[in-house]
Image: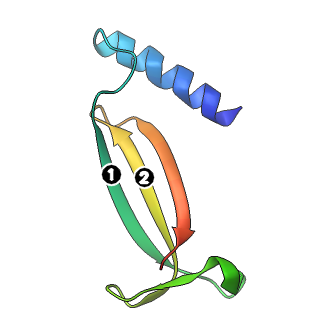
Amino acid sequence: MTERILTELREQVRLAHGPQPEPTAGIIDSQSVKGADTVPRATRGYDAGKKINGRKRFIVTDTLGLLVTVWVLAAS
């Protein structure tokens, strides 16, 4: 439900700024986040490059900066 709303709003904004409702390019960013004590060990991992035990979140936006998707995974 939330994903459908996000897609519809993104398409409306894109149509207001240009002719294409679907993005043709995207920007990916990630961030390692330290896991709190309340986060189960099964969903945490270790990012050796950042030396963080926790989760890693990935955010994808289109070229207008509109959110396309978000993933949260174990940092490993």
Which element type, helix, strand or loop, lies under badge 2?
strand
Decide: is 45 above or below 64: below
Decide: is 64 above or below 36: above
Question: Dot 1 corresponds to which residue?
Answer: 28
User: Residue 52, percent across and down?
Assistant: 44, 87
Which element type, helix, strand or loop, lies under badge 1?
strand
Q: Is residue 39 visible?
A: no
Decide: is 70 above or below 25: below
User: Residue 49, percent across and down?
Assistant: 31, 85
Would you say 10 lies left or right of 73 here?
Answer: left
Marks counted in the figure total: 2
User: Residue 26, percent across and down?
Assistant: 30, 39
**Residue 41 picture quarter:** bottom right
Decide: is 6 above or below 26: above
- Is the residue marked by circle 2 packed among few (<14), some (14-19), or many (20+) residues within 10 Å? some
Q: Residue at x 45, y 19 (%)?
A: 11
Question: Dot 2 corresponds to which residue?
Answer: 59
Q: Pointers 2 and 1 in contact (CB under 8 A)?
A: yes
**Residue 74 picture quarter:** bottom right
Q: Residue at x 37, y 89 (%)?
A: 48
Label at residue 39: none
Q: Residue at x 33, y 57 (%)?
A: 29
Amino acid type of the residue tagged 2 in the rendering: Ile
The residue closer to the viewer here, 37 or 23, is 23
Amino acid type of the residue tagged 1 in the rendering: Ile
Would you say 45 lies left or right of 32 here?
Answer: right
The residue closer to the viewer here, 23 or 6, is 23
User: Residue 40, percent across and down?
Assistant: 72, 82
Q: Residue at x 44, y 58 (%)?
A: 58
**Residue 62 picture quarter:** top left
